[in-house]
Every structure is written in C-alpha cells, then in structure tokens.
Image (cartoon, grey):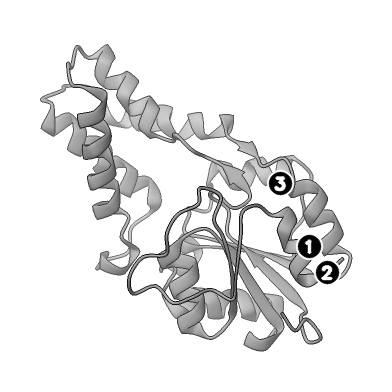
Amino acid sequence: MDISNLRGIIFDIHKTLVDDRGFPRERIWKLLLKSGTRVSMPKYYRYYDDITGELFDWTKIEKFMKVRDIHKQKLLSFYEKYNVERNVERDLNYLLRSMKECRIYEEVPRVLEILRSKYRIGLLSNADNDDPLIEILLKSGLKFDSIVTSESVKAYKPNPVVFQKILSEMKLQKHQVVLVGDSQIADVLGGKRFGIRVVWINRTNDILRKGIPQPDYEIPNLSELLCIIGR
C-alpha cells in the first residue's frame, strides 16, 4: 500500500478492536433455557444465524432505528417463536449490560499506540452512542481523534454519509485514509463503494461472499496492519 499520502486510519469496533463473539447468542440461549424452552442447540444456532442475518442486513433497513431496538426485535422473535413470556425490556437491558464483559483483542493497545504517533485515529461503528464497547475502549485508555456512530448520523455503514461524516470530523480526504473493519457489507463493500482503501480484518478465515469487492488487503489480526503501513 502506498502510504506516502496516508494521514488517518478509521477503525470499526465489533470483531475489529473488541472481541464480542457469543454476544448475545449464548445469553439468549440461557434465557430460553431458564424459561423451560426445549430446543436443540444446532436448531437454535441455525435460527439465530438466520434472524441475525435478516435483522442486521444494513442495506435492507428502510427506516433508521437504534441498534438497541434491533436487538429488541431479535429477542422478541425468539420469545414469539418459542412461546416464551418474559419481561423483554429487562432481558434486553441484561443483554446490553453483558457486553461490558467483552474484551479488547490482545494486540490492539500496542498497535494503536504505535499508529497514533503517526496518524489520526478514527472510530466508526454501526452502534448507538452509548454502546458498551465504546465505553470499554475509552476506559482502557485508548484515545481517538474522532468517534462516529450510526446513531449520531442516523444512518449505517455502508451508507456513504457515514463515511463522509468521519472524514469531515477528521478533516481528511478520501485518499488520505484507510478503513479497517471486519464486516464484508458495512466495511468492505461500504468502504470500496465510497472510494477509500479498505483493510479487511478476517479473524475467522471467512470466504469473501459473492458481490463483495476485493479489499485492498486482508489480515488475520491487527498486528499485521503494521506490516502493511509500516511502523
């Protein structure tokens, strides 16, 4: 990658900087078990993946809503499917609080410390303003020059207005930044369509789906980013 004009690096959060695997899949499973629901784990996982793919297809959400409300829809879909009667708001609050148990990937603090000495660092996520993962990052001492959430823009990646917003806040142009993220749709598709360079962080060795453009680089963890743009 030609880094002669690189001035800023924009990071996604979920599965890029913070490991949130299992959220909220395992916790919804436990809530169902507590309610006496009897369903095999493979069947539950299949339904979970299907409903998650449907609700979190950012390109098909016609009217903006907070991510919290999308999670609420997901929870309701399980309770309706398995005929569970529970306090949805209480359980939703429990699920969101449990996100605070997520952990920053081991290599992240060192990598960001190195990069901050040379580049402006932005945080861009399809998340609410009070997303617990943002709180985790800030409480750990990590610093960002700009933080833009989907709630603050009332739009989600891959919508170009989201990318334009963070460029404006970072006072940079398209050719001066690179986006690092894990989502094929939000980050790879969104970034490439917008016209910025994209580094796809593929921690789970996924296959690039049909219709998703090739990222400029693919890396298995954030440490590899230093190999691409140098120290």
User: Residue 187, percent across and down?
Assistant: 49, 67
Q: Is residue 46 left or right of residue 199?
A: left
Q: Amino acid at mark 3?
A: Leu
Q: Where is the C terminus found, in terms of image quarters? A: bottom right
Spatial CA distance of label 3 from label 2 is 25 Å
Local secondary structure at mark 3:
helix
Residue at 56 percent of width and 50 percent of height: 203
Mark 2, other Cα within 10 Å: few <14 / some 14–19 / many ≥20: few
Q: Amino acid at mark 2?
A: Gly
Q: Which residue is mark 2?
A: 230
Local secondary structure at mark 1:
helix
Mark 1, other Cα within 10 Å: few <14 / some 14–19 / many ≥20: few
Q: Which residue is mark 3?
A: 138
Q: Amino acid at mark 1?
A: Leu
First along the sequence among labels 1 and 3: 3
Residue at 82 percent of width and 63 percent of height: 115
Q: Which residue is mark 1?
A: 226
